[in-house]
């Protein structure tokens, strides 16, 4: 499964270390975040002209993950993490 996710560009090879440590990092993909800390409790989406900003909320952990999704990153790239 790991090689499939990497080959299909759902996660980047350099994300594997953070996924195994369950430690989200800026620059990860959406799939990397979900593999690392699971699905969020809820999320909010802001639609912009050429992209979407997504806030993923992990209430029990007190973590907010912010992603940008656009044509060059259709699965999203984490731009900020708030603890």
Image (tube, rainbow, N blue to C red):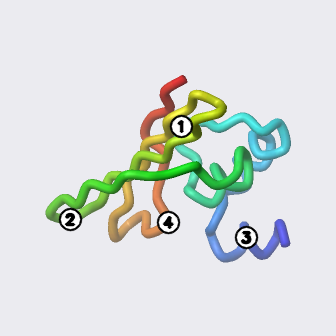
Q: Mark 4 vs mark 1: which is more N-terminal?
A: 1
Q: Mark 3 vs mark 4: which is more N-terminal?
A: 3
Residue in the image at 26% along x and 54% along y:
46
Residue named by callout 3: 5
Q: Quadrant of residue 6?
A: bottom right
Is 74 above or below relative to 69?
A: below
Point out residue 24 in the picture as x, y percentages from the top left corner: 65, 38
Point out residue 42 in the picture as x, y percentages from the top left corner: 50, 51
As rendered, which of 26 and 57 lies closer to the eye?
Answer: 57
Residue in the image at 73% along x and 70% along y:
5
Point out residue 11 in the picture as x, y percentages from the top left corner: 66, 60
> What separation in Å lies between label 1 and label 3 (alpha carbons)?
19 Å
> What separation in Å lies between label 4 and label 2 (alpha carbons)?
14 Å
Q: Secondary structure at mark 4?
A: strand
In contact (CB < 8 Å): disc 1 and disc 3: no
Residue in the image at 49% along x and 47% along y:
56
| Other residues around mark 4 within 10 Å, as few (<14) / some (14–19) / many (≥20) | some
Q: Mark 1 vs mark 3: which is more N-terminal?
A: 3
Q: Secondary structure at mark 3?
A: helix
Residue named by callout 4: 75
| Other residues around mark 1 within 10 Å, as few (<14) / some (14–19) / many (≥20) | some
Residue named by callout 2: 50
């Amino acid at each position: 499964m790991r090689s499939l996710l990497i080959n299909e560009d759902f996660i980047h090879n350099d994300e594997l270390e953070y996924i195994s440590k369950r430690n989200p990092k800026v620059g990860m993909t959406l799939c990397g975040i979900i593999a690392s800390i699971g699905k969020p409790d809820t999320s909010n989406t802001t639609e912009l002209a050429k992209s979407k900003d997504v806030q993923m909320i992990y209430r029990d952990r007190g973590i907010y993950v912010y992603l940008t999704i656009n044509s060059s990153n259709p699965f999203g790239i984490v731009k900020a993490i708030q603890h």
